[in-house]
Amino acid sequence: MYTIFISYRRDYGGTFALLLEEKLTQAGFSAFLDHKSMPRGRFDEEISRTIDETTDFIVILSKDCFKVREGTDFFVEEIEHALRKNKNIVPIFLNGYSSKQSIPDRISDVLKFQGVSEYAPQDFENVFLPKLVSYLSDTEEKQKYLDRSGARSYLSSRQKLERESLDVRWENAIEIDICAYFANMLINSDYINQALSKGVHIKYLIVDPDSDAAEEAMRYRFKNVRKSLFRYSFDAAVELLQDMREKNTEFFDKALLNGELEIRKTSLHLDQAIMIVKKKKESDNSVKVDFYTFDTDDTCRRSIMIPFADHENYEFFCEQFDYIWNSPETQPV
């Protein structure tokens, strides 16, 4: 019984796949690699059955990995099957991979999953592997790995964040940046009030309810979402901002005026909701990302926590927020 399926291209990803399978095995994981683990039987049937049995699907993205091949493309078929079976997918981006190469539409969602970039060989076990393991499902193998490795700093930082309540996560914050389709956190939320009372600068970015992005979200991304919800959420955010500007103490304590609240609307399409918490101690900074998926309830989003220790991904989502915040398609409310 395998818990991890490794998908790869033999031409440019084969060597790395063999190394990865070896290191995962040494770390106590049971990983399937067709080159070493394939039993007798029809290849396509055995591959599908193995993917069904595993909890995690690691896909190695290498040079020209999506280049059109003649005949059955098992690499694409494996990814499509994993997506269809809602497996926990973890992409690995090798140095030769280019995001400019075209990808078949039916597997394009694989790029929406949180992935890991290739590291130098000397950093494989101490940096790359712990980061990769952090994105795997919570299995007995993963727990044993964490116990043996003494809860390395990156993994322990992420797990600590996942256990924290929102008020604890916001403690000692100096700035909080939020980007989402809905402004539901601003409605009947004590968290915003408490943060503002402590002088926290809050940037809140929401989708314009009259934009094509909102129309797309209602049509493809969320079930049972009416335009009135977008409008209500947006109007509530605008009303809150106006109360702050006018110092309306009927609703807000004077202490709230110690902080600063900015709200902007955007017509850009969002693939995820982002919450960035910046603290007095920079190493305590974090990002929470909720990946929107098509045709699902809003509560079925895939969420991940990114500690400051995962600096590459932390900086990526900070830059993404800044890009949307300062985009010409984004306007102050």
Image: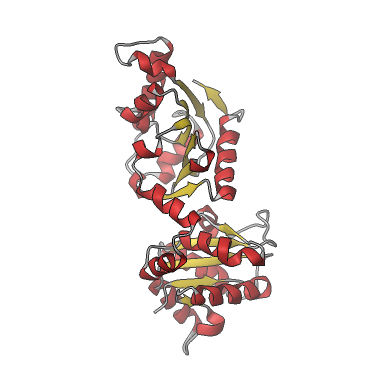
Does residue 55 sit above or below 253 in this rendering?
Answer: below
Q: Residue at x 43, y 36 (%)?
A: 181
Q: On the rendered image, what quadrant is the N terminus found in?
A: bottom left
Which of the pair 178/259 is nearer the observer? Answer: 259
The percent position of residue 184, horizontal first and vertical second, equals 35, 32
Which of the pair 129/333 is nearer the observer? Answer: 129
The percent position of residue 58, horizontal first and vertical second, equals 51, 66
Number of marks present in the image shown: 0
Does residue 190 sit above or below 97 in this rendering?
Answer: above
The percent position of residue 229, horizontal first and vertical second, equals 34, 31
Does residue 3 sit above or below 42 in this rendering?
Answer: above
Q: Residue at x 51, y 37 (%)?
A: 281
Q: Residue at x 35, y 24 (%)?
A: 193
Name the image quarter holding residue 68.
Answer: bottom right
Which of the pair 76/12 is nearer the observer? Answer: 12
Q: Residue at x 45, y 36 (%)?
A: 180
Is any part of residue 301 visible from this angle? no
The percent position of residue 258, horizontal first and vertical second, equals 43, 17
Is any part of residue 31 visible from this angle? yes
Q: Is residue 304 left or right of residue 224?
A: right
Which of the pair 223/60 is nearer the observer? Answer: 60
* Residue found farthest to the front: 150
Does residue 37 sit above or below 16 in this rendering?
Answer: below
Identify the colour scheme used.
secondary structure
